Image (tube, rainbow, N blue to C red):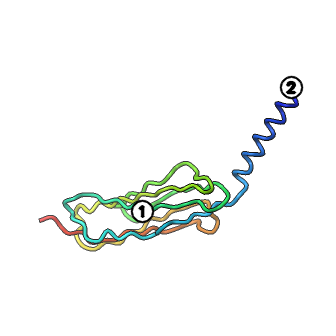
């Protein structure tokens, strides 16, 4: 009985180790979003950036930070398994910001080839009258 239990535990550990052994690779559908003309009166707008882990290891998004306080990124806190997809949403608040805008979000990952990526949003805010 002990031998079977030890064998089962070893198989579980070996299986878990394979999840961590590979290398993750992040692949975004797009890294830029143009909102075009948006009305200040309509409030915040959100862009969704979809990505896939095309590697063979768990992908971790360690942070996503915007260049200003008017832009708010949200990213998955749990690792993304190989072959799975995830989303980073970026919300821009146009209140009091008429005219053109161009904002960047720096995304940090454990993908050794893409440790830092830039997501870009842009548009033109039509002021309230």
Q: Determine which of the numbered discs, if any, sits on residue 66 in the image.
A: 1
Residue 75 in percent (x, y) is at: 47, 54
Q: Determine which of the numbered discs, if any, sits on residue 1 in the image.
A: 2
Quadrant containing the C terminus in the rendered view: bottom left
Discs 1/2, front: 2
- Image point 40% across, 65% down: which residue? 67
Point out the tag, 1 or 2, that comes first from the N-terminus. Answer: 2
For the residue carrying disc 1, how many other residues have a C-alpha within 10 Å: few (<14), some (14-19), or many (20+)? Answer: some
The front one of 29 and 35 is 29
The front one of 110 and 65 is 110
Q: Quadrant of residue 84?
A: bottom right
Question: For numbered disc 2, what is the local secondary structure?
Answer: loop
- Image point 61% across, 62% down: which residue? 54
Residue 35 in percent (x, y) is at: 32, 68
Q: Is residue 88 left or right of residue 40?
A: right
Q: Is residue 99 left or right of residue 1?
A: left
Q: Furthest-top residue in view?
A: 1
Question: For numbered disc 1, what is the local secondary structure?
Answer: strand
């Amino acid at each position: 009985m002990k031998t079977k239990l030890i064998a089962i535990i070893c198989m579980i550990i070996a299986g878990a180790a394979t999840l961590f052994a590979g290398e993750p690779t992040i692949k975004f559908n797009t890294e830029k979003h143009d909102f075009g003309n948006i009305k200040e009166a309509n409030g915040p707008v959100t862009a969704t950036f979809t990505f896939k882990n095309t590697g063979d290891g768990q992908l971790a998004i360690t942070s996503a930070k915007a260049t200003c306080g008017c832009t708010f990124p949200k990213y998955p806190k749990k690792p993304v398994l190989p072959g799975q997809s995830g989303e980073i949403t970026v919300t821009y608040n146009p209140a009091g910001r008429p005219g053109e805008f161009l904002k960047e979000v720096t995304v940090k990952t454990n993908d050794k080839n893409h440790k830092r990526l830039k997501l870009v949003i842009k548009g033109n805010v039509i002021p309230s009258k």
